[in-house]
Amino acid sequence: MRSVEVETHCHTNVSKHAYSTILENVQYAASVGLKGVCITDHGPELFDGAPSYYFSNLNLVSKEMYGVRIFKGAEVSIMDKNGRIDLSGKGLTRSLEWVIASIHLPEFAPEDFESVTSAYWNVAENPYVDVIGHCGRGNWLFDREKVLKKVKETGKLIEINEHSFDSGKDAARRCYEIAKRCKELEIPIVISSDAHFAGAIGGYRRAQALLEELCYPEDQILNLDFSRFDAYIEARRQRLKNLSVST
């Protein structure tokens, strides 16, 4: 498999359980040959997430430094089975180019299989969400067939998250099963490190090995190619612009 060119999921020390600045993340991304990096701090309802004004103010961050394109994003938390997320309004519409939606404890502790399924199904309908994050992690079992068909229908992506493999063998198996069904349904995916320290950016060993085992089509892995990822971001920008005009 060719190398990833865009890191799609990393945190800064604005999320207080992470340990590097935006600048440090970008410098490290440049040092390992990445062409782009998405800055995706946690939303405001996570226990130590960034305040909402942090996201609406991200337009102050340079578009490019050290030869690396900086995509301004967020990892929002899914708050309930209705797919509500912890960021809305200007934080989503003014500055953000890339939005991951994930389940995090204790902000949302799904009671059962149906609650997780409903949460993912509903968040897939949110026009501002691009990708469902680390859905192979934890104990959040869900109806993969129902959710992934909804993801396909709404044009969302699925994240294969390197950090998920730290959750044990069951998480690795779930990631494999999710990726296998995504391949069958021709759902585009991204590979991410979910780095909470700059030195972890660009580390995807287990995620890439899994996808290589599945012979996942490279043209369906969005962030292997910078130009393809950048084109997605531009198309997203135009789509949301049109949406705001129509509403």
Image: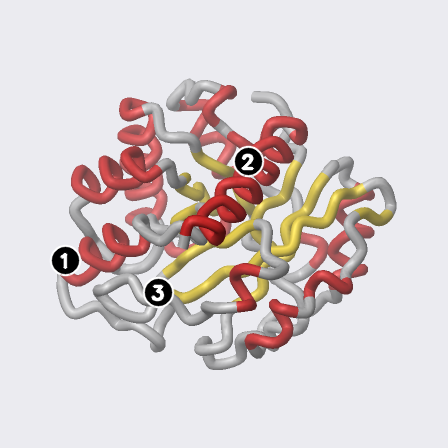
Name the residue type under label 2.
Ala
Which label is found at residue 235? 2
For the point 54% across and 44% down, the residue is 192
Which label is found at residue 113? 1
Residue 213 location (% of width, % of height): 41, 23
Name the residue type under label 3.
Ile
- Vertical side of 72 occupied by 87: above or below: below
Q: Which residue is mark 3?
A: 78
Element carrying mark 2 = helix
Residue 97 location (% of width, % of height): 59, 50
Q: Disc 3 versus disc 1: distance between alpha carbons?
A: 15 Å
Tell whether 108 sits left or right of 102.
Answer: left
Tell whether 238 sits left or right of 214.
Answer: right
- What is the quadrant of residue 232 in the picture? top right
Q: Earlier in the sequence, mark 2 or mark 1?
A: 1
Q: Earlier in the sequence, mark 3 or mark 2?
A: 3
